[in-house]
Image: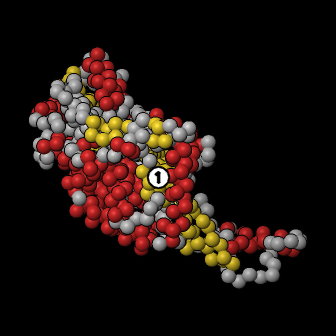
Amino acid sequence: MASADTTAVPPSANGSATANGGQRPGIAVENPATGEVIAHVPDRSPDEVRAMVARARAAQPGWEAIGFTGRGQVMRRMQKWMLDHVEEVINTIQSETGKTYEDAFSAEVSYGAAAFGFWADEAEKYLAPEKVKAGSPMLMGRRMELRFRPLGVIGVIGPWNYPFTNSLGDAIPALMAGNTVVLKPSEVTPLTSLLIEKAMHECGMPEDVLIVATGRGDTGAALIDEVDMIMFTGSTATGKKVMAKAAETLTPVSLELGGKDPMIVLADANIERAANAAVFFSMFNGGQTCISIERVYVEAPVYDEFVAKVVEKTKALRQGDPSKGPGSVDVGAITFPNQMGIIERHVRDAVDKGARALTGGRRGSGPGDFFEPTILVDVDHTMSAMTEETFGPTLPIMKVADAEEALRLVNDSPYGLGASVFSGDTVRGEQIARRVEAGAVCVNDALVNYYALELPMGGWKTSGVGSRHGAGGIRKYARQQAIVVNKYPLKKDLYMFPHGKLKTGMLRRMTNVIYGRGKRD
C-alpha cells in the first residue's frame, strides 16, 4: 500500500475551487482489495482546467525549443528513476488498483521503463523531415519536403485499469514530439499519475510541461474543450461521447476503446500451451485488460481436452489481497466497483440461458471487491458473455466444428481490437490470423503485441480510432506541413496567363508523353 506521504494529497488540497469561490469536495481514493480509503485528491473544476491548459500552452514553445536531445535527456532520467523506484511505483499502483505485484510490475513498471527509453531513442527518427519526389511535370525543379510540428497542448484522458501504461504511456510520445500534456487520470486511480508528475519534475522536466488534472467527468469534458488534441482510452460508449464533444471544436481525437478479444484453438494446436495462455491472458490483471482473451472457440476434436486443462489450471489460481508482496496471489481485485455489476450480469445471463460455470461464478468472500475466476461452457452468441465486453476474470469457451465456423463467430462482433490463433502449423495459423477482423492478431500468443512498441496498436470497428505505438503513435501528436521550394524560379511558367492555343497544345502533348507510357491491361 502506498504511504500517505508519497501519494496522498494533503488535507488542504482535498477540495478544488469553484467559479463562485466555493470548494468542490475532494475525491476519496480507495484500495479495492481492502475497501480502505487511502488518499483524497482534488476534483478540478472546469475553470481550473482552463487555467492548467493556459499554463501548458505558455510552456510549450520552450519545451519544443530544447529539441529531441533535451527532451530525450529527461526521458532517460525517468527511465532510470523508474528502475530505481520500482517498489514505490508498484506499491502506489497496487494501492489504488488492487492488482497483483506481478501485474503491476510486468504491465506497468516494465512497460514504463521500456517506453521512456524507446521514445527517447526513436522520436526524432519518426518525426524527421521526409524528402518527397514529385511525379507531376508542374513541379519540375521543385524541392518537396514533409515536416512534422507539435500540435501544442495534448489532453490525455486515462482509464482506471492501467494507471501508468494507458495514461502516462500515451503522454510520453506526446511530450517527445514537443507538445505539453494535461493528463486527466481516472478518478478511481489518480495516485500513479501524481507520483510520476512529481518524478518527472525531479528528473528535469520544466514546470507546466506535464500537468495532472484530477477530477470527474466534467473535468475531462472541460479538457476536451481547451486542448489541441485528445487521446482517450476507455469504453466504446464513453469514446463516442468524447468524439461527439471534440467535434464541437473540431478537436482531433485518438481513441483506444473496448474489445471482446477472441481466441481460436485449432485441433493441431499444442493444447498445453493453449490452455496455459487462455488462463493467463484471460485472468491477467483480473481480466481487466482491453486486449485480454474474452472468448474462446475450440475445434471439436480437442475441445474436451482443452476445457479440462483450463479448468484444472483455473482452480489452482490464488486470489486475494495482493499487498503481501511478490508471489502471494495470482489474481487481484476488481478495481472499479461498478464493473462488478457488469461481470455478475454477464455470468448470470449466460447461466440463465443454459451455460455452466465450471469454476467460480460469483463474488469472492471477505473484504474488498473480488470476483472468482470463472470458466463458462455451453455458451453461444445469444449470451452477453460472448458478445459484450465483460472486463473481468471470466472465460467463456465455445465448441466449433472447424476453423471456418470459428472465423465466422470471431468476426461476428462490433469489436476488433485484438485476437489470437493457436495452431501447430504456423503457416496455417497465420493464414487464419489474416482473416480475423482485428487490429492485432497473435499466432500461438496473445496480448504480447502490446510490448512491441515498434508496431501500431489500434482497433478496428468500434474498438477505436487511430493507434498508439510505432510511427503513427507519435505522428498523431504532430501537424504535417508540406514544404515546396522552387529552386530555379523563372519569370513565368508555361501554364501561367495568358492562355493560348499553342501553350495549351504544348501542355497536352507533355501530359501525353509523361502519363501515356503507363502499363496497359
The reply to whether residue 117 is in sight is: no
Q: Is residue 357 left or right of residue 349?
A: left
Give me the residue at 10% from left, 35% from top: 316
Position of residue 232 measured from the top left corner of the image (x, y, whole percent): 45, 45
Q: Is residue 215 above or below residue 193?
A: above
> What is the secondary structure assignment of the residue under circle 1?
strand
Q: Is residue 492 above or below residue 335?
A: below
- On screen, residue 502 versus residue 516, left or right, reads right
- The amino acid type of the residue labelled 1 equals Val
Q: Is residue 338 visible?
A: yes
Quadrant assignment, res 204:
bottom left
Q: Residues within 10 Å of mark 1 (few under 14, many from 20)?
A: many
Towards the viewer: 423 or 334: 334
Quadrant location, the C terminus: bottom right
Q: Residue at x 49, y 42 (%)?
A: 17
Residue at label 1? 182
Q: Is residue 78 above or below residue 327?
A: below
Residue at 51% x, 68% y is: 62
Q: How far from the left and from the top, in percent, is residue 391?
A: 32, 35
Question: Is 441 on the left-hand or right-hand side of 105?
Answer: right
Which residue: 34% across, 63% down? 202
* Count of numbered labels shown in the rendering: 1
Q: 428 or 321: which is nearer to us?
A: 321
